[in-house]
Image (spheres, helix red, strand yellow):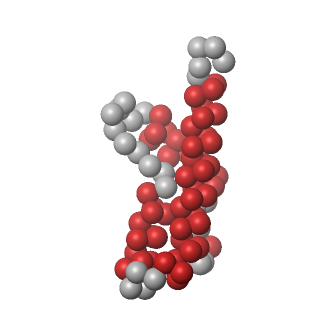
Amino acid sequence: MSNKDSPSTDAQWTGANATKFENKAYSEYFDPCQEAAQKSIRCLHRNGGDREMCTDFFQAYRDCKLQWTAARKEARKKSSWFG
């Protein structure tokens, strides 16, 4: 997997993505890991569904989701009434 295919951890949780997420409507869904998910699906299509060929893409998606959920938990702690 090339470096351009790997999600940038710094860019995903700050800047435009953070602003877009914070300013979205309550019911609006925003997933900063959507690009990694799409790359995983494209890899599967390109390789005839062979999951072994796409493990790097799957791992990048899992890492992105873990970082995103951790960032959201931390943000909720900071904005908590009891925090």
Q: Quadrant of residue 43?
A: bottom left
Q: Quadrant of the N terminus?
A: bottom right
Q: Quadrant of residue 24?
A: top left
Q: Does 62 sit above or below residue 48?
A: above
Work out whether residue 48 or residue 68 is closer to the camera in this orientation and state it. 48
Q: Quadrant of residue 45?
A: bottom left
Work out whether residue 20 or residue 31 is closer to the camera in this orientation and state it. 31
Q: Does 38 sit above or below residue 79?
A: below
Picture residue at 58% right of the left edge, 28% below the top: 76
**In the rendering, at what x and y percent does residue 23 appear?**
42, 33
In this orientation, does residue 31 appear?
Answer: yes
In this orientation, does residue 4 appear?
Answer: no
Picture residue at 61% right of the left edge, 58% below the top: 63
Work out whether residue 14 or residue 25 is closer to the camera in this orientation and state it. 25
Whether residue 50 sits left or right of residue 12 in the image: it is left
**In the rendering, at what x and y percent does residue 9 appear?**
63, 55
Whether residue 60 sits left or right of residue 46 in the image: it is right
Q: Quadrant of the C terminus?
A: top right
Whether residue 75 sits left or right of residue 16 in the image: it is right
Picture residue at 53% right of the left edge, 61% below the top: 61
